[in-house]
Amino acid sequence: MTVHDIINELRNKTYRPVYLLSGQEPYYIDLVTDFIINNVISEEEKAFNQTVLYGKETDVVSIINAARNFPMIGSHQLIVIKEAQQLKDIDKLAVYAEKPLKSTLLVINYKHNSYDKRKKLYKAVQACNGALLESPRLYENKIPDWINSWLSSKNCSILPEACMLLVEYLGTDLGKISNELEKLIISLPENDKRITLQSIERNIGISKDYNTFELQKALVQKNVLKANRIINYFAKNQKTNPFTLTITSLFFFFSRVFTWHFIKDKSSKNIASALKVNPYFVQEYERAAKKYNPRKTAQIISWLREYDMKSKGFGNASTTEGDLLKELIYKIMH
């Protein structure tokens, strides 16, 4: 089932006996869990009919005993197992799932991995008409679309450059991204619900002028002065601009530039699809490809790997990360 399927059913008060929510992306697992906690049992009944347990602090026997109780008042009771991946012998919950009570909703919040479909519990939940949700980790190239969709549901939008800047600095953790977006939405004026580079700088602290995105632009433009200003800023502010983040960002950028050279169909739509980027940024890669031929791009990728190793102490005894970055950028631009 999808998140949408499960929440729609819950809104219509269609309940399933067991909810097995698992996967590498915790965001949707927690989203469904919280929706169930906030909507199934009324506030007046929660003291009697709602139990929240944690996998590390409970056991299978206690869970089964609780699930087999009837609600003290009302029509349903709710048993939620958070961090269920820490529950010892969790697969033995299949004993309950094979014959669940209709008046109990058992929610199994299993994070950081998908529950093995070959296990007894998975098959038992499937057989008892329970809800099975798999929440996979989104790849980085899917995050901009996710951000745009999430904001659209809140009647807000974001400029492409601002979106890419968030992805660069927040990664693929949807929980972290949604928290930062919530902060940004609150700060937006009533008459303009667009997130810009300026609003990100004001409210999250990511500089609109000194970031990896602007560094890439400087390298494409071969703007030595701008590139040096940015890397000097990075060297002085390594906590917010870690060397690893800069190297990783540049590696993905030049890897895509290298790929661009060997794509036969250079139409904007095909380039965007092949590079897995927003069409808005296709021209940036085209400009980069004109400045850096395949041989130079391959050399840059090799240097990025070399300096990544140096930052970890291989072949480098004392050079600071700031000085390593200055050396690397000099080589790329000259």
Image (cartoon, grey):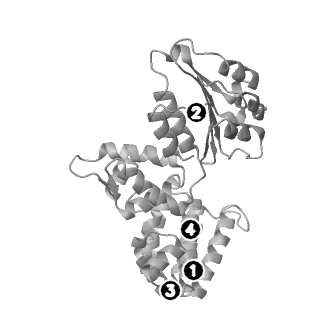
Q: Position of residue 146 (x, y in %)?
A: 46, 55
> Residue 16, labelled with which disc?
2
Type of amino acid at the residue the image marks with label 1: Thr
- Residue identifier under label 4: 325
Q: Position of residue 211 (x, y in %)?
A: 44, 62
N-terminal label among 3 and 2? 2
Q: CA distance from mark 1 to mark 2?
A: 48 Å
Q: CA distance from mark 3 to mark 2?
A: 50 Å
- Residue identifier under label 3: 265
Which class describes the residues within 10 Å of circle 2: few (<14), some (14-19), or many (20+)? Answer: many
- Residue at 57% over, 15% down: 71
N-terminal label among 4 and 2? 2
Given contact means CB atoms under 8 Å apart, are the residues at marks 4 and 2 in contact? no
N-terminal label among 4 and 1? 1
Q: Is residue 177 left or right of residue 156?
A: right
Which class describes the residues within 10 Å of circle 4: few (<14), some (14-19), or many (20+)? Answer: many
Query: Along the line of sight, which residue is nearer the eye, 39 or 195?
Result: 39
Secondary structure under tag 3 reads loop
- Give above or below for 103 relative to 3: above
Q: Is residue 53 left or right of residue 147?
A: right
Given contact means CB atoms under 8 Å apart, are the residues at marks 4 and 3 in contact? no
Q: Nearer the viewer, mark 4 or mark 3?
A: 3
> Residue 259, labelled with which disc?
1
Secondary structure under tag 1 reads helix
Type of amino acid at the residue the image marks with label 4: Leu
- Residue at 45% over, 19% down: 43
Q: Position of residue 171 (x, y in %)?
A: 53, 55
- Residue at 47% over, 65% down: 212
Secondary structure under tag 2 reads loop
Q: Quadrant of residue 18?
A: top right
Q: Nearer the viewer, mark 1 or mark 2?
A: 2
N-terminal label among 4 and 3? 3
